[in-house]
Image (cartoon, coloured by chain):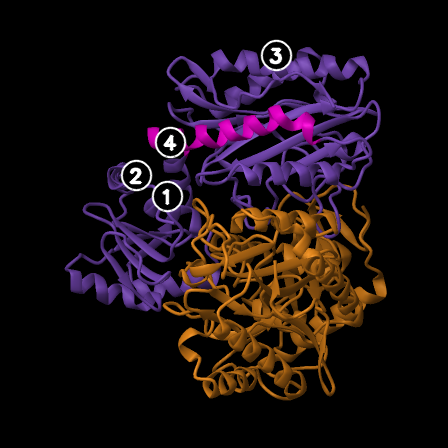
Chain colours: A purple, B orange
Amino acid sequence: MKPKIITPELSIRYKKIQTALADCGADACLISTNINMLFVAGRVLNGYCYVPVVGNPVFFIRRPVGIEVDTVYPIRKPEQIIELLQQIGMPLPRHLLVEAGEITHLDFLRLEQAMKAKKTGDCTQLLRQVRATKTSFEIELLKESARLQSEMFTELPSLYRQGMTDTDLAIAVEQSLRKKGCVPTLRIFGSTMEGGIVCVWAGENAATPSPYDFSLGGAGISAYPVGDNGTLLTQGMAVMIDTGCNVNGYIADQTRTFSIGKLAQKAYAMHQVSLEIHHQLIDFVVPGITAEMVYQKAMQLVDAHNLRHCFMGTVQQAPFVGHGVGLVVNELPVLCDRNTMCIEEQMVLAIEPKFIVEGVGAVGVENTYIVRKNGLEKITLAPEDIIAL
Amino acid sequence: MKPKIITPELSIRYKKIQTALADCGADACLISTNINMLFVAGRVLNGYCYVPVVGNPVFFIRRPVGIEVDTVYPIRKPEQIIELLQQIGMPLPRHLLVEAGEITHLDFLRLEQAMKAKKTGDCTQLLRQVRATKTSFEIELLKESARLQSEMFTELPSLYRQGMTDTDLAIAVEQSLRKKGCVPTLRIFGSTMEGGIVCVWAGENAATPSPYDFSLGGAGISAYPVGDNGTLLTQGMAVMIDTGCNVNGYIADQTRTFSIGKLAQKAYAMHQVSLEIHHQLIDFVVPGITAEMVYQKAMQLVDAHNLRHCFMGTVQQAPFVGHGVGLVVNELPVLCDRNTMCIEEQMVLAIEPKFIVEGVGAVGVENTYIVRKNGLEKITLAPEDIIAL
């Protein structure tokens, strides 16, 4: 399958990277991770993309063979890059950036030696910042992922059968998303992160701490300690379903809460607090404010309802209220305290205020939003109330 | 869910690591990746496991809170480790190994500075070598994954419906494996590798090159370029299904070939060559031979049938005939040319001779085997002939 991406779109992305390279005085960056390769080529390639601060990028590719991308040179190893750059007549970099926050130490040493730059720095944050603000093309792809994901949530009650466990329901949701075109893997930033496309938290399990840095934990099954743990879904239980739907390379992040029968009244009240936070942030989050201001605004409401003790967990609490989404499920910015990163137009934010209700489970909603001039545009449009299954 | 693992089992693993540390003159290793943490703790933990060359390991853990593991200290950051080691009265390492082939360059620099060792080296290969040879406990877990996976393959014809695409079938297989207890993610070594628990290759798509280092490629869907690509399953098409089933943390790797109706005769003949390679290797692979000898033995048979041009791909060919499996789907050893790594008893090998049949698709079988004194013990026991769907 050929990538849908077109050259004018890629040119916008190169320009954004080149502006960032110029800002930090670098001559070039050398990209090799799958995610950044997707960003600069519109597809995963095994090899390197060399982006000079001025001029056109060049691709040095191991696999697949026979690809059709502008200016591509087949290579076996990174040691060939310098000679090929010389042959093309491109100036060699004195100050080179590589993805030092993502590639392994051994790969870094090899690239540093192969590229012979006077100075080799890191472009991990630079590229994550560039990716944080989306192009109109990227936003369209995100909206399509969100549309199909919302369709799944709207149909979700039909996936439920009495006697199901949380794992059974997770599998049914996975299958539904997959049938709508979602790929089977969830792309995440951070080498100790791992996760599937669906997380189901039912009842007490929602408060179980996990080793991962997600909004909530869950004991998980087997040696995979997050989400559903085989809990039988029974009357009075809240069932929270968090999904990352990637249909076009771009992930929409959406969570909805369901119930088995009727929940204790406090659960509905706390769910309303989550909706109220969303409601207030829709107008509050505009270009120019900072990530920490978003977090603090949410926390004001959490505190006004005296719910800090059960916000984003209980014994272990996630210290954020949301995050960017895009090619990975955890793009910049993280909406947390002491993050002064500026909110910009066309950023895409997943906002997920969640509460643990003792004896009931997790409640709340997560939506993905586009940052527009006057506030947030919601793209995850499934019903937000707690629906009884 | 509490991990099933027991302390005597972990002690065997610590001993294996400590023997390897002593062999290379290191004082300790500091483990932080999920896979090695699974190996030393029996579960994923976010933090560090410090394994001294002599004495008991100590855990320094960020998340989850409140875990029950021997000698665990909660920490926020790696800079706390040295002080805690001093408080416990453990000698500080002069020659420390970290997972330099897996952790990022920036994480390496941080650990190097935090740990203040005179020399900081790499334990990636050392730990992969230790993990290559399994304990009896690990083999039991592998057998259980293999058993459930074989059950799925045996039931597979009931998952097929006329008019399905390869993607529809992949989704049905995923769902079946998940219902048997398989986790939703496939753990793989290598930062540019990614994959799901199921790969379906139907017809011509089997020969499409991919950026990943799997046995075959496939165009994939969307921005996920491997495996099924929406090919309608039609008469005369070979359908190869490759799955990694992880029920207990340990992955069994098994591939079977199915057909839609009857295939061209040459497809059955080439499938028999794959079976013949398995048959010969079962007696040939014994402790003491090398990985390259396994590869060369397989290639002798491939050449005897004059099938080198379509072995493990056509335009792009995988240069191996198999690999270790365990906590990741691609453990050591790689069964390829110029690999002198010695085959040892209780290694677990996935052997996967596959051929592309022009106009038909991919044929062949992959089995997971335990290396025993007198040859290979097969643990993936689904029927091996091409079954018509």
A366 w.r.t. B70: above or below: above
In the image, B115 versus A287, the foreground residue is A287
| Circle 1 chain | A
- For the residues beneath circles 2 and 1, the answer to whether they share a chain is yes
- For the residues beneath circles 4 and 3, the answer to whether they share a chain is yes
Q: Residue at x 50, y 64 (%)?
A: B214
Magenta region, residue range: A132-159
| Measured Cα–Cα span from mark 3 to mark 2 | 36 Å
* For the residues bearing labels 4 and 3, Cβ distance under 8 angstroms: no
Magenta segment's dominant SS is helix
Instruction: Check disc 4 and report its element: helix, strand or loop.
Output: loop
Say what amino acid the circle numbered 2 marks. Answer: Arg
Q: In this view, does B80 lie to the left or right of A104?
A: right
- The residue tagged 4 is A134
| Measured Cα–Cα span from mark 3 to mark 1 | 35 Å
| Measured Cα–Cα span from mark 4 to mark 1 | 11 Å
| Circle 2 chain | A
Of the numbered discs 2 and 1, the one sitting upstream in the chain is: 2
Q: How crowded is mark 4: few (under 14 residues within 10 Å), some or many (20 or more)?
A: many
Using the rendered image of the protein, determine whether residue A218 is visible from the camera's viewpoint: no
Say what amino acid the circle numbered 3 marks. Answer: Glu
In the image, B389 versus B115, the foreground residue is B389
- The residue tagged 1 is A39
- The residue tagged 2 is A13
> Which x, y percent locates residue B196?
57, 52
> Which x, y percent locates residue B369?
68, 74
- The residue tagged 3 is A276
Q: Which residue is drawn at 38% across and 42% down?
A: A127
Q: Residues within 10 Å of mark 2 (few under 14, many from 20)?
A: some
* For the residues bearing labels 2 and 1, Cβ distance under 8 angstroms: yes
Instruction: Check disc 2 and report its element: helix, strand or loop.
Output: helix
A386 w.r.t. A180: above or below: above
